Each structure stands twice: as structure tokens, then as C-alpha cells.
């Protein structure tokens, strides 16, 4: 794997850039070092499809094992996309030898800078307890990029196509749950049956519900998990109201 770094990043990692050209652009990434929330952040952008991977809150120890950190970041992000683990591991296996070089040309640098600008938009979604920012990586990779005269692409969709060509078979495989979501209206019920990946967060489930019912995310929302204990149901306007009278034990906003 070839990681083509800005001078700022090369200075920090203290690596001498090699002169090397990887024929398969799927194994080439451009990398920039930026600061988000006063923390060192590396933004990786794939040369072939502009897919984005973010490492956040890097410390000295992380830079010393940067090869491992980069491979883990790519691995975890692709797994979070519900890509078959065998395909992800084969991609990582073929990427184990990482070489560091200089940025290729102004075109690639421009694409990398554009990706960094997208990541800036979502810095409030970055997690403080991990270097590997899979959620922000996925969100940034769904940002349409390109120029009007050349057309626009979705980096995530392009990455999926490239991985399918790499693997020679369908790439998605994950455990999922089937949910029946019912709206209890005055005279009838409205329901949707959904298949949701088991590793989905409640934030992601919220977005699925918005899409399934054709909503536009205009209102606040909360998730409640109920136990066996009963509660007074006379206050039916309370957000935690449950017509059977069960008391909530967990409130997820």
C-alpha cells in the first residue's frame, strides 16, 4: 500500500519518502494531517474512488505504530460498512507492506483538501474515546464530489464497486435483525417491516425510520427501552408514555 503524504505529515512521522508507483490505485491513498478540536487528525483519501478514512486524536504512540493504525482504520471502517470480513481481511493482507511517499500532483492534492473540508463539517460527530472514526469516515464518503463538466460521484458507492471487482463476488455480508415498526393511529395502524444491520447505532436507526416513513427529520426524537416495572400512565403526554404501562429503564436521545 502506498500512502502519499503532505510534507507536514511526513515531518511528523519522520519518514523518508520513497519513489514508488503502485499500479493498482485501490491500494493508493493520499494523507493529510489536520487539526480538529485541537487534536491531530489524519484524513486518508483513496486515489481510485475518493473514499475517506479518518483517524482522530492521534498521539505520539499512534504515530510510532502508524502502519498498524492505518490498516486498522481502513479495516474497521469497511467492516462498519457491512463488507464481508473475508474480503476486508484479504484487502488488508495485500496492503500489509506500507510505503510512504510524497503527494502525487495538484489534482490529487485538491481532492484530498476537498475531503478534509468535508470532514471539518462533521467534527462535532467525532468520538473522543477512539482513534478510529468509522462513522465520520462513512458520512464523509457519502458526500458527492466532482465537477459539473466531469460529473459527480459518491465515493462510498465507487469503493463498493471497486471492492466487488477486487473480490470477484458480492461484498456485503452482515448479521441483521428484522423490525416491525408500527404507528398507532386513531382508526388504523401504519407499519413498516425493516431489515437493519445488527451493528447499527440508534442514530443510524433514526435515519432509517425517517427514510422508511418518508419523514424529513423535523421533530425531536427519543428511544426508550422498557422493563417489567409498571408506571402511572395517566400522564399520556409524557415522552416515555407506553399504553401498556411499562416503565422505561433506558432513555436514548
Image (cartoon, rainbow, N blue to C red):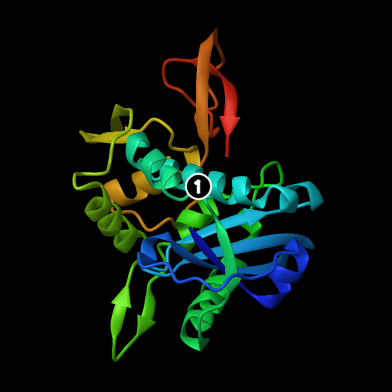
Tell which of 130 and 218 is nearer to you: 130
Residue at numbered disc 1: 96
Asked if residue 17 lies left or right of residue 80, the reply is: right
Image-quadrant location for residue 34: bottom right
Q: How many marks?
A: 1
Q: Can you say whether 29 is above or below 177 in the image?
A: below
Q: Can you say whether 69 is above or below 98 in the image?
A: above
Say which residue appears at 37% left-offset and 61% top-offset: 26
Residue 118 placement (x, y as % from top left): 54, 70
Asked if residue 48 lies left or right of residue 35, the reply is: left
Say which residue appears at 61% left-offset and 45% top-offset: 68
Residue 238 placement (x, y as % from top left): 55, 32
Tell which of 22 and 68 is nearer to you: 22
Q: Is residue 184 visible?
A: no
Q: Residue furthest front?
A: 19
Say which residue appears at 66% left-offset and 52% top-offset: 66
Circle 1: element type: loop
Residue 162 placement (x, y as % from top left): 28, 58
Asked if residue 68 lies left or right of residue 189, the reply is: right
Q: Can you say whether 26 is above or below 196 in the image?
A: below
Q: Is residue 54 visible?
A: yes
Say which residue appears at 46% left-offset and 85% top-offset: 107
Asked if residue 253 lies left or right of residue 23, the reply is: right
Image-quadrant location for residue 44: bottom right
Residue 252 placement (x, y as % from top left): 57, 34
Image-quadrant location for residue 39: bottom right
From the image, which quarter does the C terminus lie in? top right
Instruction: Give neighbour class at mark 1: few <14, some 14-19, many 20+ (Cα, 10 Å).
Output: few
Amino acid at each position: 500500500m502506498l500512502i502519499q503524504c503532505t510534507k507536514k505529515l511526513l515531518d511528523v512521522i519522520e519518514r523518508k519518502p520513497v519513489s514508488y508507483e503502485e499500479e493498482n490505485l485501490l491500494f493508493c491513498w493520499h494523507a493529510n494531517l489536520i487539526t480538529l478540536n485541537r487534536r491531530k487528525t489524519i484524513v486518508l483519501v483513496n486515489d481510485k474512488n475518493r473514499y475517506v478514512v479518518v483517524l482522530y486524536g492521534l498521539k505520539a504512540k499512534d504515530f510510532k505504530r502508524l502502519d498498524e493504525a492505518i490498516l486498522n482504520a481502513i479495516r474497521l471502517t469497511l467492516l462498519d460498512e457491512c463488507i464481508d470480513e473475508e474480503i476486508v481481511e484479504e484487502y488488508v493482507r495485500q496492503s500489509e507492506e506500507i510505503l510512504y511517499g510524497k503527494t502525487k500532483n495538484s489534482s490529487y492534492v485538491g481532492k484530498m483538501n476537498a475531503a478534509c473540508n468535508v470532514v471539518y463539517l462533521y467534527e462535532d460527530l467525532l468520538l473522543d474515546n477512539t482513534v478510529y472514526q468509522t462513522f465520520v469516515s462513512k458520512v464523509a464518503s457519502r458526500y458527492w464530489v466532482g465537477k459539473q463538466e466531469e460529473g459527480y460521484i459518491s465515493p462510498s458507492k465507487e469503493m463498493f464497486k471497486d471492492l466487488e471487482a477486487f473480490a470477484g463476488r458480492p461484498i456485503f455480508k452482515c448479521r441483521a435483525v428484522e423490525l416491525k415498526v408500527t404507528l398507532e393511529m386513531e382508526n388504523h395502524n401504519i407499519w413498516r417491516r425493516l431489515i437493519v444491520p445488527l451493528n447499527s447505532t440508534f442514530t443510524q436507526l433514526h435515519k432509517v425510520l425517517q427514510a422508511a416513513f418518508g419523514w424529513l427529520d423535523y421533530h425531536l426524537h427519543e428511544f426508550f427501552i422498557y422493563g417489567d416495572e409498571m408506571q402511572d400512565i395517566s400522564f399520556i403526554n409524557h415522552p416515555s408514555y407506553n399504553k401498556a404501562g411499562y416503565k422505561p429503564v433506558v432513555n436514548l436521545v
